Amino acid sequence: MQVLILGGTTEASAIAAALTGDARMRPVLSLAGRTRAPVLPAIPARRGGFGGVEGLVAYLQAHGVAALIDATHPFAVRISRNAAAAAAIAKVPLVTVLRPQWAPCPGDRWAEVPDMPAAAQALGAEPRRVFLTVGQQELAPFGLAPWHRYLIRSVEPPDPALLPATARHIAARGPFREDEERRLLEQEGIEVMVTKNSGGAATAPKLAAARALGVQVVMVARPPPPPGETVPDAAGALAWLDHVAATWKRGV
Ligand code: NAP
């Protein structure tokens, strides 16, 4: 059975790894192509956009895809919206992997904001040392608050044109350990951290480190979830796939 996994997350990689050598399935992992040197699984992979809903429908039909797993990041709203629309048009079963959100624990100092411009505003008028862990694509609002000192961590270096003048970049790929996160926050004298509410274990240690050190966290809320069936993790997606495969075999 031909399976398309929309990826770019640890869950997508886990699904790909679990399907390696599964004789029932012909999985393909699709990546947007943002990361220059992605960690690739042993299953076939493709890179780059499909060309909107129309392009994705054409791909699903041309490759006889019988199951679509949207395991993209919770903040990757466009591809998820396209996946829902294309699956409906091509009549391909779709499941979305939506990992649980992070929730504040006792001792956390969170300021929850709706989007990135609000996050930049929440940093305030006084200069602060800020740790930005929001990826490299949404930095522009922080350029409007150049009085802060920014430390930016992302897998790929950001476009220098988007960087506030006072910003420094460190390239790193999770998972991260709490003791390392603590050391980084202490060494850099970080007063406030900005993050998206991505959820998941790989990057959660930064929140524990912030809690332990009393560092404030500006938490950008998630966009609304896509329509349709969701599962919280890779195991849920694999169980869903088993079910689809059983139905598909019977030709129902
Ligand atoms: P997005 O805004 O939802 O998507 C923009 C366009 O990129 C889509 O319309 C699609 O192009 C293409 N695209 C996105 N994901 C794709 C995939 N898995 N395979 C093929 N094409 C894809 O996405 P984004 O927020 O830029 O995220 C890009 C990738 O990075 C995703 O794979 C996501 O899982 C991963 N990621 C995102 C974040 C985040 O915070 N946004 C964090 C970690 C990882 P077409 O319309 O041409 O098909």
Image (cartoon, rainbow, N blue to C red):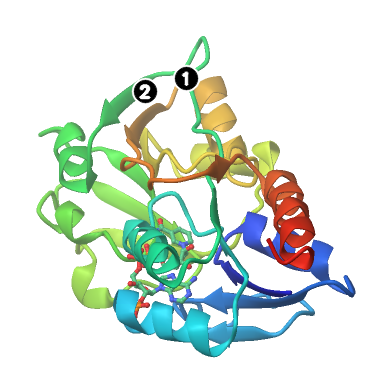
Residue 41 picture quarter: bottom right
Q: Residue furthest bottom?
A: 62
Mark carried by residue 110: 2
Residue wearing tag 1? 104
> Which residue appears at 40% of the width and 62% of the height?
88
Q: In terms of depth relative to the viewer, which is nearer, 206 or 168?
A: 206
Residue 252 picture quarter: bottom right
In the rendered structure, the answer to whether residue 135 lies left or right of residue 201 reads: left
Residue 192 in the image: x percent, y percent?
35, 34
The reply to whether residue 186 is visible in this rendering is: yes
Q: In terms of depth relative to the viewer, which is nearer, 242 or 34?
A: 242
Ligand 1, seen in the image, is in the quarter at bottom left
How many C-alpha atoms fall within 10 Å of the one at disc 2: few (<14), some, or many (≥20)? many
Circle 2 sits in a helix, a strand or a loop, which is it? strand
Vertical arrangement, residue 239 with respect to residue 5, above or below = above
> Which residue appears at 46% of the width and 18% of the height?
108
